[in-house]
Image (spheres, rainbow, N blue to C red):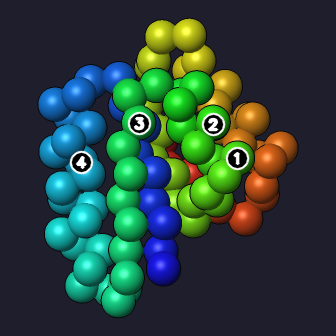
Amino acid sequence: MLKIAVCDDNESFLETLKKIISENAINYFKDVNVQGFNNGQSLLNQHKHIFFDVIFLDIDMPEFTGFDVAEILRKQRRDCYIIF
């Protein structure tokens, strides 16, 4: 199963991006799971339990920027793809 995380503080954009990714990834992978997060902390908390293969990050978010989140994610696991 391909596990994808999308993190963006704009709820409308988050839902749109999740939909686009889900609809297109299924063309290439048999089993896809796309989860959305509206802040970096919730993504980091979930990533401790479910390691994502691909992570889409918004750069400009309150509290943690996408770069802050990416730095922490890299310390937890280096083999996931991070897309800004």
In terms of depth relative to the viewer, which is nearer, 81 or 50?
Answer: 50
Q: Earlier in the sequence, mark 1 or mark 3?
A: 3
Q: Earlier in the sequence, mark 3 or mark 4?
A: 4
Decide if residue 11 is on the left or right side of residue 30: left
> Is the C-beta separation of discs 4 and 2 under 8 Å?
no
Q: Is residue 8 above or below residue 83?
A: above
Mark 4 lies on a secondary structure that is helix
Residue that numbered label 1 is attached to: 48
Give the x, y percent position of residue 61: 45, 18
Residue 81 seen: no
Q: Residue furthest front?
A: 49
What's the residue type where badge 4 is placed? Leu
Mark 1 to mark 2 CA distance (whole Å): 7 Å
Mark 3 to mark 4 CA distance (whole Å): 11 Å
Mark 4 to mark 1 CA distance (whole Å): 23 Å
Mark 1 lies on a secondary structure that is loop
Residue that numbered label 2 is attached to: 44
> Is the C-beta separation of discs 3 and 4 under 8 Å?
no
Decide if residue 35 is on the left or right side of residue 19: right
Q: Nearer the viewer, mark 3 or mark 4?
A: 3
Decide if residue 72 is on the left or right side of residue 22: right
Q: Is residue 63 above or below residue 23?
A: above
Q: Earlier in the sequence, mark 2 or mark 3?
A: 3
Q: What residue do we see at 64% from left, 59% from top?
A: 51
Mark 4 to mark 2 CA distance (whole Å): 19 Å
Residue that numbered label 4 is attached to: 17
* Residue 81 position by quadrant: bottom right
